[in-house]
Amino acid sequence: MRLLIGFLISCALPAQTATVESNVIFGMHSGLALLLDVYRPAKSNGYGIVVIPGSGWHAPMGYDALPLKQSKEFVAHLRKLSDAGYTAFVITHRAAPRFHYPDAVEDAQRAVRFVRNRAGTYGIRADRIGALGGSSGGHLVNMLGTLDGKGNDGDPDPAQRESAKVQCVVALYAPSDMAKVDTPFGSVTVTAFLGMRPPRPNARNSIEARLYHDASPVSHVTADDPPFLLVHGDADRIVPFSQSEIMEAALRKAGVPVKLIRVPGGGHGSSFPGATEKIEWSGEAVAWFDAHLRKQ
């Protein structure tokens, strides 16, 4: 199976692309290695993108389970990033049912810090890093764009001294307000990830209310956040389209550059199943990164 995934990935990238560096350890947690794959373009434009596939914040528990970084969600779309010269870092993070919030968020931040700390090695700018994610991965890149992400100057690990804030975000069909993901599958997945049920409407000061608030990207939006491109199908039965509308409204209110692309009839997933209009979202993503990540 792993050989098949590797074959699919190699076919999706241009023939002239440099080799993919697999299983780079970007952090450790209690002896558990956190892995990422680095996709180097044939000709780098000097910018890096942290990519987080969707998984419902969950991963299989078997010894033969594939890492989240080997998800097929973005395989066909990495070519557009590579053709445009972007170096992509596709990551694995700790996941439910073994791990819960904020583990996945902390791992996503660790990945950004690791990439930023080693920017010279990868030939990219440390001060201009983008993020791309879908579904639960979209939630995580939204967090990377909205959380402060300040590093710890006194940490003995130099990577932990780096900022985890990214400078441009592309989020597909992503949760933004965790208490309002009210579809059957979506709400069950959120509950399992957060480790508790949603708060009751009148329990604003409860532990549940505070946790759901803290885990929601929309709660952390401020005027200094980076530009956001949001793409979402309006027939999504897992993460409601309203989740991206909520995020767009909060970003606009804060004065943050944002664009929401509505996919008519589109369901949940990178192919937007059922869409009545075809959308080349990977091209839109590249254009967004070109316009907002590379402009400085």
Image (tube, rainbow, N blue to C red):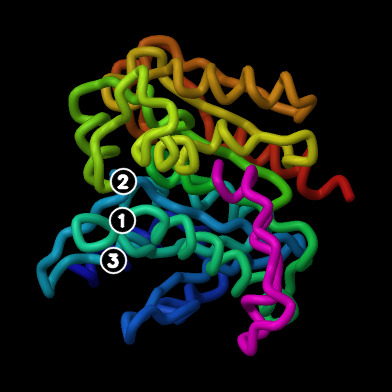
Q: Which residue is mark 1?
A: 100
Q: Secondary structure at mark 1?
A: loop
> Residue at position x 67%, y 79% from top?
118
Pick the front one: 21 or 181: 181
Which mark identifies residue 67?
3
> Residue at position x 53%, y 64% from top?
89
In the shown orientation, is residue 207 left or right of residue 131? Answer: left
Q: Secondary structure at mark 3?
A: loop
Kind of residue sitting beneath label 2: Leu
Of mark 1 and mark 2, the one earlier in the sequence is 1
Compared with 114, 277 (above or below) is above
Q: Secondary structure at mark 2?
A: helix
Pick the front one: 42 or 184: 184
Q: Is residue 155 magenta?
A: yes
- Please report the bounds of the magenta region as a residue range: 142-165
In the shown orientation, is residue 289 left or right of residue 220? Answer: right
Of mark 3 and mark 1, the one earlier in the sequence is 3
Q: Which residue is mark 2?
A: 194
Kind of residue sitting beneath label 3: Pro
The mark closer to the camera, 2 or 3, is: 2
The mark closer to the camera, 3 or 1, is: 1
